[in-house]
Amino acid sequence: MKKVRLCSLLVGAALALSLAGNLSAADPKIVFKLAEIHPKGYPTELADEKFAELVNKYTNGEIRVDVFPGGELSGDEKVIIEQVKVGAIHIARVSSGALGAFNPQMTVFGLPFLFDSGDHMWNFLLGAGGTKMLKDLEPSGFVGLCWYDGGARSFYSKNPIATPEDIKGQKFRMIGNPILMKMAEGLGASPVSMAAGQVFGAIQTGVIDGAENNPPSLISFNHYQVVKYYTLDEHCRLPEVLFMNKNVWGKLNKTQQAAFTKAAKETVAFQRKAWADYEIEALQKVKDGGVEVIEVKDKSAWQAAVKPVFDAESKPFADTVKAIMAAKPKK
Ligand code: GTR
């Protein structure tokens, strides 16, 4: 552990040295590393690649971004975020669920049933509220580049889950968002926190009964191979975030910064389209893989069961929650 930390500090220090001057066209060797835990071809990964391509184009070849998919730099998003913080990794795409441990405002997305739909989430993310949240990553040492779609998360398990009562007594891996952990506890489950990469083995060996995630992740992490039931309760939407180290950003000149901003902005619609297409395909793959997918048409029992958690946990985020409620699309 100590070794890893020392190593990342050294890499961070080396990077700081290499970026000691202003980055300019005179230095054609500006190469940034972008970390991604999903494999090649996954919707966020496709967007990372698009971002890299556009950065290169808009900086006239001055800057190259190398994408490392499939957890090549680390399979653990917590480690990735730590590395971005020290500058050993320059850019990353992670879930807002993981970022909350470093930037508490991001925790708000763990509030169950906060958004009515994907459109509701995007209305907020693309408006003043979502823009402010990206900006508010700065005190944590990060620059938020853009949001990506991460769909809705639902429970899956070796055991059937037809109603909220069925959650009772089961052990679930919840993404390390404290509100989601409390939600699982509120439903009578035992929540366990671990990196996404450990979940497959933990389900297989019976350490946990299941987990919660969006359909594409059940495929990318192969979880569909070790569970039998996927209940589409859609308890939350955790947007994905593309962000970078703030000092590295500070070393870019204004034109380069503008190129990054433009590139990131242009990848959003591209990623949303890739997401929408792949979400349907992934759910079909989950079904074809032998998992029983249980639709939850009426979510009121689920919403009622987690209301006490929502009421208690939303208090510290009152302003953001108000802005999110105001972003509901008009019917
Ligand atoms: C996925 C997300 C990953 C990771 C994973 C998890 O939906 O795309 O970045 O956060 O969830 O549950 O750890």
Image: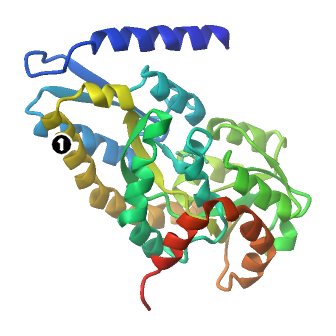
Q: Residue at x 47, y 38 (%)?
A: 139
Density class for disc 1 (Cα within 10 Å; few <14, some 14-19, many ≥20) is some
Q: Is residue 255 left or right of residue 171?
A: left
Q: Residue at x 36, y 13 (%)?
A: 15
Q: Residue at x 28, y 61 (%)?
A: 269
Is residue 170 shown above or below 32?
below
Instruction: Find residue 297 and report its horizontal and vertical position in percent.
Output: 64, 84
Is residue 147 shown above or below 201?
below
Instruction: Find residue 262 and report its horizontal and vertical position in percent.
Output: 20, 48
Which of the pair 16/120 is nearer the observer?
16
**Count of marks placed on residues:** 1
Which of the pair 146/133 is nearer the observer?
133
Mark 1 residue element: helix
Tag 1: amino acid: Ala
Mark 1, residue position: 258
Instruction: Find residue 283 and report its horizontal and vertical position in percent.
Output: 54, 64
Which of the pair 264/229 is nearer the observer?
264
Q: Of all residues shown, which one is farthest toward the bottom?
A: 331
Query: Looking at the rendering, in which quadrant would you find the C terminus?
Result: bottom left
Query: Looking at the rendering, in which quadrant would you find the N terminus?
Result: top right
**Splitting the image into 4 quarters, where does residue 238 fall?**
bottom right
Instruction: Find residue 14 and report its horizontal and vertical position in percent.
Output: 38, 8
**Splitting the image into 4 quarters, where does residue 67 fall?**
top left
Q: Is residue 126 left or right of residue 175?
A: left
Q: Is residue 35 left or right of residue 4?
A: left
Q: Residue at x 51, y 71 (%)?
A: 324
